[in-house]
Image (cartoon, rainbow, N blue to C red):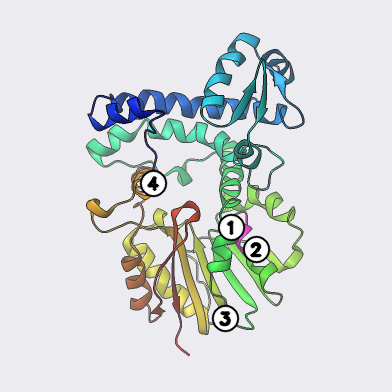
Amino acid sequence: MRLGLVPGNPVEWLAMRLNLVPRPLLDTQMAFTLARIVMVASKIGLFDALATAPATAEEIARRCDTNPEGTAKLLPTLVTSGYLRASGDTFELTKSARKWLLSASPQSLNDKLLFQFMEWTWMERAEEFVRTGKLEDFHATLNDREWKLYQRGMKSVAGGVVESVSRAVRIPAGATDLLDIGGSHGAYSVALCRQHAKLNAVVLDLPGAVRHAAPLLAAEGMGERVRHQVGNALTDDLGTEGYDAVIIVGVVHHFTDEQNRALAVKVARALRPGGTYTIADFFRLPHASKAQQLPAIADFYFALTSESGTWSPERMAEWQRAAGLEPAKPKTLPAGNVGLQAAVKPA
């Protein structure tokens, strides 16, 4: 999957083939303007305002407590981008908007779009990163309000992939104990525990993450079967043979190669014989000629905002093998371009 220009008629297709379309303008000004329009529409509650019935621009502005003229300027872009349908002077939600942008939807990305206002400011440091290599480790600078936005945003992202990821994670038969490293909101642990009746999970994360993810986990109604533990997997002892499975979803891109190697050793010690260690993340491909667009963008983003960026499944398997685990073949899931690299502790 990739972002890009989509010709709307044969003339536009021919213009693209002849390199007559000023693609850099469309990839930049048009793209960031569209992004901001969708983010603002979500923030003002525009999509929720259309949840029950179509409305005119004036009615939408009244429901959202916004300026009628300014609100009306948002609507044509949302129509042409597939989020709204227009019929005369009225507007209604498309199926895509109902699934991804209504607050009541289990797959709603509203909270992620609110978090993106923070990410927008981080991307302004992209030039400095490219010129100097200086990164922005946001985990070290988040204030209380930002931690809350971050946790809610990550929970909303998980909503679209949690089922496919959890069903692809190998859990040993009869497993009773799962460790979820950096799992914050606990969505993956909750899904796995619902799939495996005997399984209980510990979600290990930083203090700020646990503080603001606790209400999100409590809302799942899993009681003591899925519980938080404040800690840092890079510095804490994970114990010896206390878990049947360990998962780490969307976290290894925050760690350096050395940190991931050391973590794999601690995970191997924490696993019982026959236990599994599953890494789920974007996969980095070894050569730019084989790179896919979305993982490549993610690699740059995570390198800018954290310690390293994404990793290849081969490198992940190296960490696991060096720790005495037996890596399996990697899996790539279609939802969200997520990859899984699992390994088993020999019996």
Q: In which quarter of the image is residue 40?
A: top right
Q: Identify the mark nearer the N-term, 4 or 2.
A: 2
Q: Do the residues labelled 3 and 1 touch (CB within 8 Å)?
A: no
Mark nearer the N terminus (4 vs 1):
1
Amino acid on which the number 3 mark rests in the picture: Pro
Q: In screen coordinates, is 51 left or right of 234?
A: right
Question: Helix or strand or loop: what does disc 3 sit on?
Answer: loop
Callout 4 amino acid: Leu
User: Which residue is more in the foreground, 291 or 178?
Assistant: 291
Is residue 187 on the magenta stretch? Answer: yes
* Proximity of marks 4 and 1: CB atoms separated by less than 8 Å: no
| Residue 205 lies within the magenta run | no
What residue is shown at x 35% (from left), y 51% (from top)?
309
Q: Which label's residue is closer to the chain start, 2 or 1?
A: 1
Per the image, label 2 sits on a secondary structure element best described as helix
Q: Are marks 3 and 4 in contact (CB under 8 Å)?
A: no
Residue span colored magenta: 185-189
Q: Name the residue under label 4.
A: 294
Dominant SS in magenta: helix
Tell me if residue 281 comes above or below residue 132 in the rendering: below
* Residue type at the position of mark 2: Ala
Q: Of circles 4 and 2, which is in front?
A: 4
